[in-house]
């Protein structure tokens, strides 16, 4: 059975990085500077996540790159503005993957403690993700991407869904990650006092 640190996820993430770089070039060739900038930010962030090899489970790296690719497709082919649920699905999945990755980075020092307090852990992760979604909506408003208040409300609902899903998935990854961290700490030599 695959675990959250399967090597194939890392390889797939690097392939996704390559396609994301191609999407940036294509978006820039269309003179879509706003889209190119946002995709470059996603590329930089996903590159950072993928290069932090031992900080995150490789599955989380892969999911973040998939979210970046969904956003790339939305910008390159204008899928965000077409009828259909693409914008909503991308919002939920992006918040899900960003929350999953960032929560493990932010809360990594407390994973062993959270193992005994799963409800608090889930609430912390979900709240963190909802805050990320709210910041994203403020950013959309600041750069003039928001179409209407209805779009903002739907996006916030999808962000909340993605954050809640991230909290649930994170609970399944927590025992695996906190167990591996505690066993690596046990193997480190102790200093004489």
Image (spheres, rainbow, N blue to C red):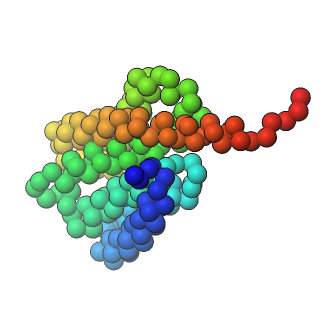
Q: Residue at x 79, y 40 (%)?
A: 189
In the orientation shown, which residue stands out farthest toward the left?
83
37 displayed left or right of 145: right
Name the image quarter holding residue 43: bottom left
Q: Residue at x 44, y 63 (%)?
A: 8
Please provide percent x and percent y for residue 142.
34, 46
Q: Residue at x 27, y 67 (%)?
A: 76
Q: Give the total number of marks visible in the rendering.
A: 0
In the orientation shown, which residue stands out farthest toward the bottom?
29
Asked whether the viewer can see residue 183, the reply is yes
Q: Is the residue 44 above or below the residue 94 in the image?
A: below
Name the image quarter holding residue 86: bottom left
Q: Is the residue 123 above or below the residue 93 in the image?
A: above
In the orientation shown, which residue stands out farthest toward the front?
1
Q: If the image is split into quadrants, where does the C terminus sit?
A: top right
97 displayed left or right of 79: right
157 displayed left or right of 24: left
Residue 39 or 185: which is nearer the viewer? 185
Please provide percent x and percent y for residue 135.
38, 39
Asked whether the viewer can see residue 64, the reply is no
Please provide percent x and percent y for residue 133.
34, 39
Please provide percent x and percent y for residue 19.
37, 71
Residue 4 or 131: which is nearer the viewer? 4
């Amino acid at each position: 059975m695959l675990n959250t640190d399967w090597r194939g996820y890392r390889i797939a993430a690097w392939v996704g990085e390559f396609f994301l770089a191609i999407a940036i070039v294509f978006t820039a060739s269309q003179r879509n500077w706003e889209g190119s900038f946002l995709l470059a930010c996603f590329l930089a962030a996903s590159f950072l996540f993928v290069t932090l090899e031992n900080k995150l489970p490789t599955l989380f790296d892969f999911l973040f790159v998939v979210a970046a690719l969904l956003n790339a497709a939305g910008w390159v082919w204008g899928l965000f503005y077409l009828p259909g649920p693409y914008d909503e699905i991308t919002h939920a999945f992006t918040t899900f993957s960003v929350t999953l990755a960032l929560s493990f980075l932010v809360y990594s020092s407390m994973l062993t403690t959270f193992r005994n307090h799963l409800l608090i852990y889930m609430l912390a992760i979900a709240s963190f993700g909802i805050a990320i979604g709210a910041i994203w909506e403020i950013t959309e408003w600041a750069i003039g991407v928001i179409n209407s208040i209805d779009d903002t409300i739907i996006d916030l609902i999808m962000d909340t869904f993605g954050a809640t899903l991230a909290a649930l998935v994170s609970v399944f990854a927590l025992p695996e990650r906190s167990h591996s961290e505690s066993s690596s700490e046990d193997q480190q030599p102790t200093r004489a006092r």
